[in-house]
Image: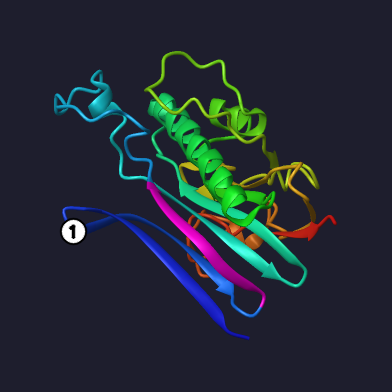
Amino acid sequence: MGYGFIFAPQCTNFVVMDALSFIILSPWYEVTVIFLIPISDAGLKNRQANLGDLNDPCVRFKRDCVGIMAAFRLKDPSHLIIVANTHIYWDPELADVKLAQARYLLSRLAQFKLLVSDKFDCSPSVVVTGDFNSLPGSQVYQYLMSGSSEAGTLPEISDDVPIPLCSAYASTRGEPHFTNYTPGFTGTLDYILFSPSGGIKPVSYLELPEPEASDVQGGLPNYYHPSDHLPIGAEFEIIQ
């Protein structure tokens, strides 16, 4: 079996600051459309920034973060699936920045879904994955699950209605105890989300270690896990 690869770096002054990728099982899928979206400014209009002042939105919301989305055509049966992947900003003190990035991502995803729907005369399924750097119960998590938010003032973004999403893990077994495990922090930050009305449903998931498992003791990365984040995964069934 052959694999395809899509790599999307986010560069600042020719330095790769963040990057995302898709690895595709080529015999089963073909790529139809790809979009790379910088979410570093969360849709802010360009203007001169007051460098170093976090009260200036053009400083506060300017982060080296990125999202990628692609439409894949499943060959048998014929079905279109949009998959988006992102890495949201990390700092817990800037929760408003994370929420703005999540809102902007979903607004662009809604635009992309409309483009794909019109181009191929279909209703594509939607899967959104990534490191959202946000715990279950946080504003970002609640927004992604509900498509709405009670947050305060945010930077100007599109008025497109976000796509309602569910968590693949939460809808099958509950969110993992953690996906990030370091000596200073342990919690769930990574998610696989899907549109429940999109013709797919999760049927299985990748098991993660329990907190007392020997292969995570002392924190990550370690010999067994080469990253401080654990891999997550889900298998979906197409509902005809």
Say above or below: 102 vs 123. Answer: above
| Residue behind mark 1 | 14
Which image quarter holds the C terminus? bottom right
In the shown orientation, is residue 188 left or right of residue 20? right
In the shown orientation, is residue 61 left or right of residue 86? left
Q: Closer to the camera, 77 or 222?
A: 77
In the shown orientation, is residue 39 left or right of residue 137? left
Question: What's the residue at 42%, 27% (across, down)?
Answer: 157
Say above or below: 126 vs 7. Answer: above
Q: SS class of the residue under badge 1?
A: loop
User: Residue 93: image x %, image y %?
Assistant: 39, 26
Q: Closer to the camera, 129 or 126?
A: 126
| Stretch in magenta | 28-37
Q: How is the image coloured?
A: rainbow
| Amino acid type, callout 1 | Phe
- Secondary structure mainly formed by the magenta segment: strand
* Quadrant in the picture for residue 196: top right
User: Residue 164: image x %, image y %?
Assistant: 67, 34
Residue 96 among those drawn in magenta: no
Decide: few, some or many residues near mark 1? Use Cα within 10 Å; few <14, some 14-19, many ≥20: few
In the shown orientation, is residue 23 left or right of residue 121? left
User: Residue 44: image x %, image y %?
Assistant: 31, 29
Q: Closer to the camera, 89 or 153?
A: 153
